Amino acid sequence: MSDLITGLRRLHLPTVNRLYAEYEQMATRESWSYTEYLDRLVAEEIAHRIETRVSRAIRAAHLPFIKTIEEFDFQFQKSVERRMLGAYLGPELVSEGRCLILCGPPGTGKTALSVAIAMKAIQNGFDARFVTATQMITALTEADRRGTASEVLPLYLDPDVLVIDEVGYLSYGPNAANVVFQVVNHRYLAGNRSMIFTTNKEPSDWADVLHDADLSEAILDRVLHKGEIIKLKGQSYRRFSARKQEENML
Ligand code: ADP
Ligand code: MG
């Protein structure tokens, strides 16, 4: 029997190792066939691997919070229908390199939707990376200055899905358009790789935000080549949920 344990270790089958004895008893009790016994152990190993991969990918994505599309309240946010998001929630987000700009005032659920899209991509077997525009611009500007861009750029180029949150919330430095363009252009040339942006500014105002009309047009051209803008309207969910909490306390 020790040979079996050694073999399972060598094959990296920890779940089979953990469960085989217990399942052997169940098999006897419930008269499973040999195939059924093997089938169940293999299924457990696969399920465990998927779980491990998903939780590792969620950690690597640096999401600001966890929100799934199932948890998103489309009754509250009526300006977007789940149907409109179909192309961003399936594997074609990555295979067809779809891009999306979620645009709207604070609290309308832009970040929550971008997180939900990244979560779905991870569940579909891809990896994702969430970053705020400020973080990315600062990191790349700094890297340019130090000559370490080749180490930092892959952070934003390697993931299957890149979420760039909050374009336009802060005034960026003079290098902003340049570094955003570097990322967008590399991803575009690498085969239209998926990017999700959230912004409180109309994309037509990105020229002001990024201090460069030509580069901002070049950025939007590439993003919108296989992408679209979805506008979110209405009340802030933050205020809505604060009010709901207050009502519950009364
Ligand atoms: P924005 O990025 O547009 O400023 P967020 O996505 O950060 O807004 O939303 C603020 C908070 O409200 C988050 O915790 C988010 O999960 C939640 N939220 C926003 N819209 C919805 C919604 N329609 N259904 C459920 N939760 C929502
Ligand atoms: Mg946000």
Image (cartoon, grey):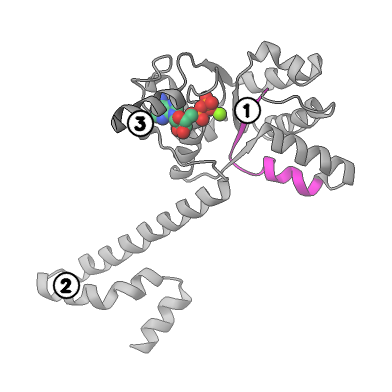
Q: CA distance from mark 3 to mark 1?
A: 27 Å
Q: Which residue is mark 3?
A: 245
Residue 202 shown left or right of residue 54 in the figure: right
Q: Earlier in the sequence, mark 1 or mark 2?
A: 2
Q: Nearer the viewer, mark 3 or mark 1?
A: 3
Q: Which residue is mark 1?
A: 166
Q: Which residue is mark 2?
A: 26
The structure residue drawn at horizontal position 60% and vertical position 19%, both measured from the top left corner, is: 200
Q: Is residue 219 above or below residue 115?
A: above
Say which quarter of the image contains residue 155: top right
Say which quarter of the image contains residue 197: top right
Q: Is mark 3 within 8 Å of ligand 1?
A: no
Q: What percent of the width, then of the height, locates residue 20?
A: 28, 75
Other residues around mark 3 within 10 Å, as few (<14) / some (14–19) / many (≥20):
few
Residue type (three-letter) at the residue carrying disc 2: Met
Q: Earlier in the sequence, mark 3 or mark 1?
A: 1
Residue type (three-letter) at the residue carrying disc 3: Gln
Other residues around mark 1 within 10 Å, as few (<14) / some (14–19) / many (≥20):
many
240 or 130: nearer the viewer = 240
Q: Is residue 127 above or below residue 93?
A: below
- Most extreme residue toward the left is 30
39 or 112: nearer the viewer = 112
Q: CA distance from mark 2 to mark 3?
A: 48 Å
Residue type (three-letter) at the residue carrying disc 1: Glu
Other residues around mark 2 within 10 Å, as few (<14) / some (14–19) / many (≥20):
few
Residue interval drawn in magenta = 150-168
Label 3 with label 1: CB-CB less than 8 Å: no
Task: Determine if residue 217 is in view.
Answer: no
Dot 1 lies on which element?
strand
